[in-house]
Image: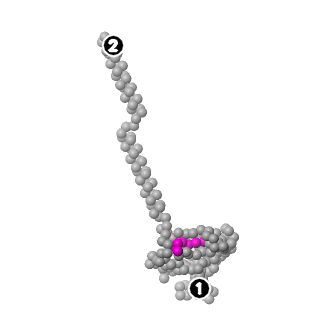
Amino acid sequence: MSNRRVLQSAIRAHASVSIASRSRLKAFTIIELLLVMTLMVLISGLIIFNVESFLSGLGERPLPDILKIAVRESRFQSASIKEPVLLTFDTKTSKFLVLGERMNEIISFETGYKSDDPDVDVTFYKILPARGISAKRLNDFSRKEISHVTFHPDRSSTPFFVSLKYDNSESVHRFDPFSNAELSTTGI
């Protein structure tokens, strides 16, 4: 009988050990769960922070940079579609617009300003032949205000400069009519 008891207790001990080892193999420890949850929180925090900073950075380009991008894109679009395109500033939407010959919108550039913002004034000027593009100051220009700048398929444009007034800042940006590179920037 004692052998029987020993055998039964051995069977019970084996059964409890195998149940414990089986449950241990099928489950995670609390430390493993905490470690995984901590890593998930850290990774999600980094992702959320990066997405928020990316989204907040949209539309925060300075107005002169947006103008340069619009000029470059106008030149490119004109050469691509092989017809003149127009660059203008829509005061109602506060966007730079690239328009086709039939006044159809090809592309627009958000400035980050509200529609009809009175603090933003973009004026295009045609440089007249009297003094030409070599003038150094705003007062030296022989100019005529125009509503848009025309870019031709041969990648040339009307000789022009743009006066920007925004956020209590004023600047004048002159562009080369053949390369459309910015020749100078002048604070007024």
Q: Residue furthest top?
A: 1
Residue at the image position 34 percent from the left and 21 percent from the top: 12
* Residue identified by numbered label 2: 4
Where, by quadrant of the figure, is residue 147 drawn?
A: bottom right
> Residue 34: x, y in percent?
37, 43
Q: Nearer the viewer, residue 129 or 183?
A: 129
Q: Residue at x 68, y 68 (%)?
A: 81
- Mark number displayed over residue 144: 1
Residue 26's place in the image compared with 135, above or below, is above
Residue at horizontal 57 percent and vertical 80 percent from the top: 124
- Residue 45 percent location from the top left of the image: 41, 53
Residue 157 position, x and y percent, is 64, 77
For image coordinates 36% across by 39% down, the residue present is 30
| 172 horizontally vs 30: left or right | right
Q: Is residue 27 visible?
A: yes
Residue range (magenta): 92-98
Residue 25, above or below 46: above
